[in-house]
Image (cartoon, helix red, strand yellow):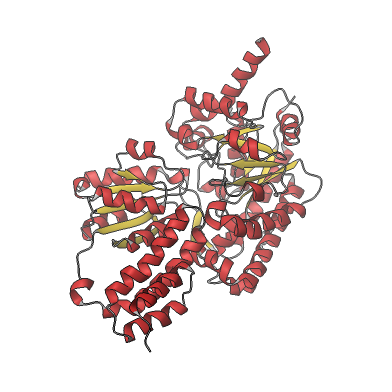
């Protein structure tokens, strides 16, 4: 069973020899400075060059970290293409927004349509095409930034959050437009060769929005995106940040195959509440950066035992996380699999 | 017939709790015209409403978006009442804190909440914004003679920026002049201890308690 087949089965509740160990990319960053040193490809250059982006993504797999490749390595592609100003960051800091394009949801008409043929949007699509052309055994994950997170990167988040309640009509027009732009980008990623689409929406959490707005905005527009993707894809992963105890019922409505979440959510608790989805996660990124490899191995196996069908970090990796810790996720799962076989 | 002070205070509090950022201005103006003291209007009206909102936030009845709207109403009311504060109240020494989000991170919702809650509790907050280099934290803390440095991050990738700030405070020889508080979703008590921070809080309401504890304020 190669990595692609294993993930494909795991995505759809089918039996596998062991759970796959993946890290999608995007907000769920899998790039570390150790990996940059090994591959000789560094940030911020790799955010701007398709060949470098593809090579760095592949280095992650070749160095025994995760059983997938994935691009990009940030969550600013959509916002930049829609008009926000971005700094590319440096070796340890991810690209991030420095200037917003809109001051109010009322200005929704000012959003610039995403251009698939220029800038970093094209870099990402080209990187996927390059990875596809290499015929790897591992799945290619295309990442998009969720609708609430993109919307609150194109405009000042504090105003945005308030207007979700105070200017509902315009807020929905704005969200619809943002979601439709994201759909075009995600579809282009699938056309370019992405097997899976991962959507991370860290700014659209139940903790920030509360159950009502979470359903009205986050769930609604995430589903709009998922429903408009091509049928010919391996699956869709949605990552939700923060505590979920107030929004389990709403999370259950999300149309993805997989739900991934933070380490603050106990996998066993999530398993109790969420019956439809395959669960993914949630090895503490704190332990991955500051803990010992043995501890990481234990945590990975615990996630598996507690009901995770796909083992992954709980959030984006800290760029200074040591390579041995990252490798320990997969190592732990493989060791546990062999032990099981012996019994 | 004028409305009683008690009634107006209740109304001020309610306006904040119900996020009425326009009505609160009318009520505050009526309160001043009736000749009641501004300080009571702030403490027993606006701040009372904000405190009730934070109780609901702790009980998970209110969420971040609600708190942001409540604070808008509180600040709108404050703008009316503040000019009527007697000078000695206006200049009464408040504990000074700088607050900001570490370099590389632009997520400032958590930081904004902490700032709102601490302002409500009587701290003088200097907001350095987001994506703030360690140097800037330390320079401002020094220049403002801050007693507290509050550092926030929402991303694992930028967490180590907190440690850089603490190291820099030591290098400049002012580590002992300030208490350092950290927070944000990837941060834990253990991490706070490991990097030598003085306090950690899990949310914005808790942050006020921690800050008061660190500075020995009742």
Occupied quadrant, residue A29? top right
Instruction: Evaluate whether residue B107 shows in this view.
Output: no
Residue in front for this viewpoint, A127 or A287:
A287
**Count of labels in the image:** 0
Instruction: Evaluate whether residue A280 shows in this view.
Output: yes
Does residue A280 appear to the left or right of B146 in the view shown?
Answer: right
Residue in front for this viewpoint, A73 or A222:
A222
Tell which residue pokes out farthest to the bottom in this image.
B1
Does residue B119 appear to the left or right of A45 in the view shown?
Answer: left
Question: In the rendered view, would you say B194 is above or below B24?
Answer: above
Residue at (42%, 75%) from the top-left corner? B11
Question: In the rendered view, would you say B105 is above or below B43?
Answer: above
- Percent coordinates x, y for residue B16 in the rendering: 44, 69
- Percent coordinates x, y for residue A295 in the rendering: 48, 25
Occupied quadrant, residue B167? top left
- Percent coordinates x, y for residue A331 in the rendering: 57, 22
Does residue B118 appear to the left or right of A27 in the view shown?
Answer: left
- Percent coordinates x, y for residue B128 in the rendering: 35, 60
Residue in front for this viewpoint, B121 or A31:
B121
Residue at (62%, 28%) from the top-left corner? A304
Question: In the rendered view, would you say A245 is above or below A65?
Answer: below
Quarter in which the N terminus of chain B is drawn: bottom left
Tell which residue pokes out farthest to the right in this image.
A231
Residue at (48%, 67%) from the top-left corner? B69
Residue at (46%, 31%) from the top-left corner? A322
């Amino acid at each position: 069973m190669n990595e692609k087949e294993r993930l494909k089965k795991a995505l759809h509740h089918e039996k596998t020899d062991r759970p796959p160990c993946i890290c999608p990319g995007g907000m769920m960053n899998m790039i570390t400075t150790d990996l940059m040193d090994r591959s000789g490809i560094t940030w911020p250059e790799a955010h701007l060059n398709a060949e470098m982006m593809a090579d760095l993504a592949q280095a992650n797999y070749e160095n025994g970290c995760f059983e997938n490749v994935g691009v990009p390595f940030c969550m600013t592609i959509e916002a930049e293409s829609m008009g926000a100003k971005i700094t590319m960051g440096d070796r340890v800091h991810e690209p991030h927004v420095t200037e917003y394009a809109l001051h109010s949801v009322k200005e929704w008409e000012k959003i610039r349509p995403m251009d698939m043929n220029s800038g970093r949007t094209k870099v990402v699509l080209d990187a996927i095409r390059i990875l596809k052309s290499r015929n790897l055994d591992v799945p290619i994950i295309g990442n998009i930034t969720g609708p609430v997170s993109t919307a609150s990167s194109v405009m000042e988040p504090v105003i945005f959050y308030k207007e979700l309640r105070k200017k509902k009509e315009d807020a929905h027009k704005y969200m619809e437009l943002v979601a439709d732009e994201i759909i075009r980008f995600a579809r282009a990623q699938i056309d370019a060769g992405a097997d899976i689409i991962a959507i991370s929406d860290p700014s659209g959490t139940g903790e920030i929005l509360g159950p009502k707005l979470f359903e009205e905005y986050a769930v609604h527009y995430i589903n709009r995106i998922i429903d408009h993707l091509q049928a010919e894809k391996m699956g869709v992963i949605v990552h939700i940040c923060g505590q979920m105890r107030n929004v389990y019922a709403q999370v259950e409505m999300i149309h993805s195959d997989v739900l991934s979440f933070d380490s603050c959510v106990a996998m066993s608790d999530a398993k109790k509440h969420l019956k439809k989805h395959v669960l993914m996660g949630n090895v503490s990124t704190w332990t991955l950066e500051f803990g010992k490899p043995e501890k990481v191995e234990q945590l990975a196996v615990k996630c598996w035992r507690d009901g995770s069908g796909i083992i992954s970090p709980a959030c984006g990796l800290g760029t200074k996380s040591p390579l041995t810790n990252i490798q320990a996720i997969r190592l732990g799962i493989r060791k546990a699999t062999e032990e099981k076989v012996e019994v | 017939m004028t409305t009683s002070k008690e009634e107006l205070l209740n109304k001020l509090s309610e306006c904040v709790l119900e996020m009425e950022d326009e009505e609160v201005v009318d009520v505050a103006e009526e309160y001043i015209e009736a000749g009641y003291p501004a300080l009571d209007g702030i403490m027993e009206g606006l701040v009372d409403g904000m405190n009730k909102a934070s109780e609901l936030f702790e009980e998970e009845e209110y969420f971040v978006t609600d708190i942001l709207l409540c604070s808008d109403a509180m600040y709108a009311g404050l703008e009316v009442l503040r000019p009527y504060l007697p000078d000695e109240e206006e200049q009464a020494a408040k504990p000074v804190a700088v607050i900001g989000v570490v370099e590389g991170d632009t997520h400032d919702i958590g930081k904004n909440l902490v700032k709102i809650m601490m302002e409500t509790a009587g701290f003088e907050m200097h907001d350095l914004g987001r994506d703030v280099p360690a140097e800037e934290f330390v320079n401002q803390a020094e220049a403002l003679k801050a007693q507290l440095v509050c550092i926030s991050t929402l991303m694992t990738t930028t967490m180590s920026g907190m440690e850089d700030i603490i190291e820099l405070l030591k290098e400049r020889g002012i580590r002992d002049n300030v208490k350092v508080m950290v927070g944000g979703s990837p941060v834990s008590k253990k991490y706070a201890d490991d990097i030598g921070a003085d306090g950690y809080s899990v949310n914005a309401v808790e942050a006020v308690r921690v800050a008061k504890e660190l500075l020995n304020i009742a």
